Image (spheres, grey):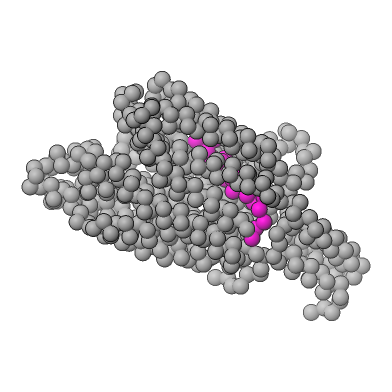
């Protein structure tokens, strides 16, 4: 090792740069490979002189960064109001998903549109999922504040269309528009936090922001029921308008991002538009739409062997392969930049988020069915019975955020998430018609804590290892995979449930038509068989739901791969203490 004092000083500064910091690291956006070339200047022919210049420049930059910490990030009342606006924006999206549950029966009565129920959710999911990565690119190329406000505005427009809809088709179109806005809201909130809060403090701020999902899961169904019964189902959409207006006002007045504003804005608009990867986007969006349509329609509207469903999957496969090729070809200007995707922590976070999302959505989707079918509760009561899962997940998110900020390391909470989710899911898989209240409450709490512990860690990991300019792409990629995991595995769970139900019905209840059971609502099972056969039917139905829960359990266990391969890095800026 060299004894050159200039090199020693260079190393010291490099270590300080990676150490604890409450402000913006001035050379954070500099590519790692460029840093390596600069820091190897001691081996150049001009040797120490080059290093002296580099050290001097870095010393000045570091001094400026330390002295300007308080100026780089908002603080006090502006930061408080910005965080209020971000929490409201996340609440807006989360509430829109949960409030609709209790309104759908009234909507179908008004429009005589029972067959369209699935599309009220699917239209929203199609645009949210397919535009997620596109928003990540928008946040990189254009002003973050402008893109976020645009996303809120599009969401508000969609809510307005839904509120004034005169028929089911218009409502579905409004849901698609709202989904297009929602795609940029959650990722935008995470990106704004990255620009407003030092890395060390981001977990706690992110935890409280994502905690809005837990609040929405509690308030949404109850509020939806009250508005639907006392006023009109249309107010389930109108309520978004004043909340969105408050968010737009607060963000418009108080949000200023000096860390982004320092960059060069002289790039021509045409160049920026080309950097959006129009070819890749034009291939990616229809690919995801084909996949989601196949998952939505397969096994319900059309059999999986149908030519339509097979065609959807084939087109998806061709377009997705083409998209991968385009991303490799475009490299740094791609929608999914290869070096970001191949980053170890990001790749681990993608795996973890994909399977966590799949597991969580299966239980959110099928637990209410278990309550309604097996315990004969109403839809509203089943929502109340789901509160232990909602509250415990919210608690897990907040606890992990606070402790990650306190101790620095996020990877331990990924391990805790794996353990708690797997145990809780395994217990939920054992539920029987005679299971006690204490059992289904306790099992939900265990699973909810686990999903809460792990929920935000992939996005925190991406922020810990990526340059500030790459965070939008990394965050959008992880959130996309979480959504995609939910969409794919809910469909997988549905098919496992249906196949098991058909098989066991034919085996144990030969006089009952399995298709009639599938097409009957969960609360109407008692009308399908004589009273003497009801216990057997409930046992068969419970066994089929248990198979769907088994899928959720397997997915929860699969997250261990993401936890084990995740790098051990600290949000306090410490060097990794271990790697898997």
Q: Nearer the viewer, residue 497 or 73?
A: 73
- How many labels were placed on the picture? 0
In this view, 278 is above or below 107: below
Question: Residue at the spot x=48%, y=25% of the render?
Answer: 161
Q: In this view, which residue lies farthest toward the top?
A: 166
Q: Nearer the viewer, residue 227 or 416?
A: 227
In this view, 436 is above or below 513: below
Q: Position of residue 138 (x, y in %)?
A: 64, 40
Kindly indicate the quadrant of the structure image that contains residue 559. bottom left
In this view, 154 is above or below 535: above
Question: Residue at the spot x=36%, y=64% of the render?
Answer: 423
Q: Nearer the viewer, residue 418 or 305?
A: 418
197 magenta-colored: yes
The answer to whether residue 93 is visible is yes
Q: Is residue 196 left or right of residue 293?
A: right
The answer to whether residue 129 is visible is no
Q: Is residue 68 left or right of residue 521?
A: right
Identify the main secondary structure in magenta.
helix
Kindly indicate the quadrant of the structure image that contains residue 166. top left
> Where are the magenta residues, as a range?
177-200
Q: Position of residue 97 (x, y in %)?
A: 43, 39
Q: Position of residue 41 (x, y in %)?
A: 84, 66
In this view, 528 is above or below 364: above
171 magenta-colored: no
Question: Residue at the spot x=26%, y=41% of the render?
Answer: 378
Rendered-image quadrant of the N terminus: bottom right
Q: Position of residue 128 (x, y in %)?
A: 50, 39
């Amino acid at each position: 090792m060299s004894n050159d004092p200039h090199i020693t000083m260079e190393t010291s500064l490099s270590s300080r740069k990676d150490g604890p910091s409450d402000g913006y690291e001035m050379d954070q956006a500099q590519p790692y490979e460029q840093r390596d070339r600069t820091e190897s200047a001691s081996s150049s022919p001009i040797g120490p002189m080059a290093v002296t210049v580099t050290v001097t420049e870095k010393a000045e930059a570091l001094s400026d960064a330390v002295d300007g910490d308080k100026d780089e990030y908002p603080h006090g009342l502006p930061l408080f109001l910005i965080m209020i606006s971000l929490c409201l924006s996340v609440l807006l999206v989360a509430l829109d998903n949960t409030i609709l549950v209790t309104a759908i029966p009234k909507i179908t009565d008004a429009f005589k549109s029972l067959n369209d129920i699935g599309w009220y959710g699917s239209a929203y999911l199609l645009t949210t999922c397919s535009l997620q990565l596109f928003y990540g690119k928008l946040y990189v190329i254009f002003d973050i504040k402008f893109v976020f406000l645009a996303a809120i505005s599009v969401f508000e427009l969609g809510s307005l269309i839904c509120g004034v809809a005169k028929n089911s088709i218009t409502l579905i179109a409004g849901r698609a528009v709202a989904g297009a806005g929602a795609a940029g809201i959650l990722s935008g909130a995470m990106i704004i936090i990255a620009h407003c809060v030092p890395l060390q403090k981001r977990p706690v701020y992110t935890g409280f922001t994502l905690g809005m999902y837990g609040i929405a899961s509690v308030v949404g169904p109850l509020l939806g029921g009250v508005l639907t019964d006392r006023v009109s189902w249309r107010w389930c959409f109108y309520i978004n308008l004043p909340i969105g207006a408050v968010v737009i006002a607060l963000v418009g007045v108080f949000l200023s991002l000096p860390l982004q504003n320092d960059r060069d804005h002289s790039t021509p608009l045409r160049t920026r538009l080309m950097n959006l990867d129009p070819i890749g986007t034009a291939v990616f969006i229809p690919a995801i739409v084909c996949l989601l349509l196949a998952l939505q329609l397969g096994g319900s509207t059309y059999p999986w062997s149908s030519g339509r469903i097979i065609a959807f999957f084939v087109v998806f496969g061709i377009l997705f392969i083409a998209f991968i090729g385009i991303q490799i070809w475009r490299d740094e200007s791609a929608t999914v930049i290869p070096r970001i995707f191949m980053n170890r922590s990001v790749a681990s976070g993608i795996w973890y988020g994909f399977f966590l999302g799949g597991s969580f959505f299966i239980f959110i989707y099928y637990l209410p069915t278990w309550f309604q079918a097996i315990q004969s509760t109403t839809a509203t009561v089943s929502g109340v019975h789901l509160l232990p899962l909602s509250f415990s997940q919210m608690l897990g998110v907040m606890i992990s955020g606070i402790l990650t900020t306190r101790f620095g390391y996020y990877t331990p909470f990924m391990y805790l998430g794996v353990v708690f989710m797997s145990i809780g899911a395994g217990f939920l898989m054992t539920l029987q018609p005679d299971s006690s209240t204490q059992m289904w409450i306790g099992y939900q709490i265990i699973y909810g804590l686990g999903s809460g512990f792990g929920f935000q860690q992939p996005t925190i990991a991406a922020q810990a290892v990526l340059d500030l300019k790459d965070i939008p792409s990394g965050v959008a990629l992880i959130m996309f995979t979480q959504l995609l995991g939910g969409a794919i595995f809910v469909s997988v769970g549905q098919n496992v449930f249906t196949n098991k139900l058909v098989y066991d019905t034919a085996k144990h209840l030969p006089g009952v038509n399995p298709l009639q059971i599938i097409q009957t609502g969960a609360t109407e099972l008692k009308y399908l068989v004589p009273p003497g056969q009801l216990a057997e039917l409930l046992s068969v139905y419970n066994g089929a739901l248990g198979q769907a829960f088994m899928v959720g359990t397997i997915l929860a266990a699969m997250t261990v791969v993401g936890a084990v391969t995740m790098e051990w890095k600290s949000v306090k800026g410490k060097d990794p203490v271990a790697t898997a």
